[in-house]
Image (tube, grey):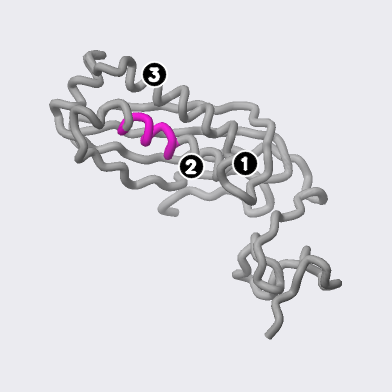
């Protein structure tokens, strides 16, 4: 079977049939960027979370501000915010968005032990910000790892997931509901 090329006169902008179709795959199975031009601009918010698990001694080093590379949590916070703003450069089919708000909260947790990283991203536009929130958390977690890897190589990044999203046609989603 011959593979269709972009020169073929087929409707590649149509999603594949079925209620569970992947929106970034066209009818011929090729990747595509979703056309959001007809969607109304609405307020959209996404919240994502992840954890960086380490030993208590490493967590104490972070909290006390004595890490050799400097302010671990402050640096990770800025890295996460910057990553949210650059998501479309990192994830091939994401739309570039003019984000109106990005907050990144990093909470040391002695029970893990480690840090809980949470990003909240907001935009008024035709598409959601789930990928921006997830990217912010991922990069903040990676930055924490990078800043403490000389002390502890066995640090684990885990549980990165979408907690909540509001806005758009699909409405309100909350993990666990």
Residue drawn at (69%, 72%) of the image: 16
Of 3 and 12, the residue lying toward us = 3
**Mark 2 residue element:** helix
Residue assigned mark 2: 134
Q: CA distance from mark 2 to mark 1?
A: 12 Å
Residue 22 in the figure: left or right of residue 137: right
Q: Are marks 2 and 1 in contact (CB under 8 Å)?
A: no
**Magenta region's main secondary structure?**
helix
Bounds of the magenta segment = 137-145
Residue under the point 63% across and 47% down: 94
Cα separation between marks 2 and 3: 18 Å
Residue 146 position within the rendered picture, expressed as x and y whole percent measured from the top left? 32, 31
In this view, the mark in front (2 or 1): 1
At horizontal 56% and vertical 42% (from top left) the residue drawn is 90
Image quadrant in which you'd find residue 140: top left
| Position of residue 114 measured from the top left corner of the image (x, y, whole percent) | 24, 33
Q: Position of residue 23 (x, y in %)?
A: 65, 61
Magenta run includes residue 142: yes
Instruction: Check the image and name the residue furthest to the right.
Output: 9
Query: What residue does disc 3 label?
Result: 74
Q: Quadrant of residue 109?
A: top left
Label whose residue precedes the other's in the sequence (2 or 3): 3
Q: Which residue is mark 1?
A: 88
The answer to whether mark 2 and mark 3 are in CB contact below 8 A is no
- Judged left or right of residue 28, residue 58 is left
For numbered disc 3, what is the local secondary structure? helix
Residue at position x 51%, y 38% from top?
133
Q: Name the outermost residue toward the bottom.
A: 1
Pointer 2 or 1: first along the chain: 1
């Amino acid at each position: 079977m011959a593979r269709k090329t972009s020169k073929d006169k087929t409707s590649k902008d149509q999603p594949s049939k079925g209620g569970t179709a992947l929106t970034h795959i066209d009818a011929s199975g090729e990747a595509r960027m979703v056309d959001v031009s007809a969607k109304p601009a609405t307020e959209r918010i996404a919240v994502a979370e992840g954890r960086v698990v380490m030993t208590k001694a490493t967590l104490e080093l972070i909290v006390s501000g004595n890490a050799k590379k400097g302010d671990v949590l402050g640096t990770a916070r800025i890295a996460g915010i910057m990553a949210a703003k650059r998501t479309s450069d990192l994830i091939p089919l994401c739309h570039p968005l003019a984000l109106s708000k990005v907050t990144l909260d990093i909470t040391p947790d002695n029970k893990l032990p480690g840090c809980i990283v949470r990003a909240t991203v907001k935009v008024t536009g035709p598409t959601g910000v789930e990928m921006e929130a997830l990217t912010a958390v991922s990069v903040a977690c990676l930055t924490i790892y990078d800043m403490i890897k000389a002390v502890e190589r066995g640090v684990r990044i885990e549980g990165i997931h979408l907690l909540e999203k509001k806005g758009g046609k699909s409405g309100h989603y909350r993990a666990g509901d």
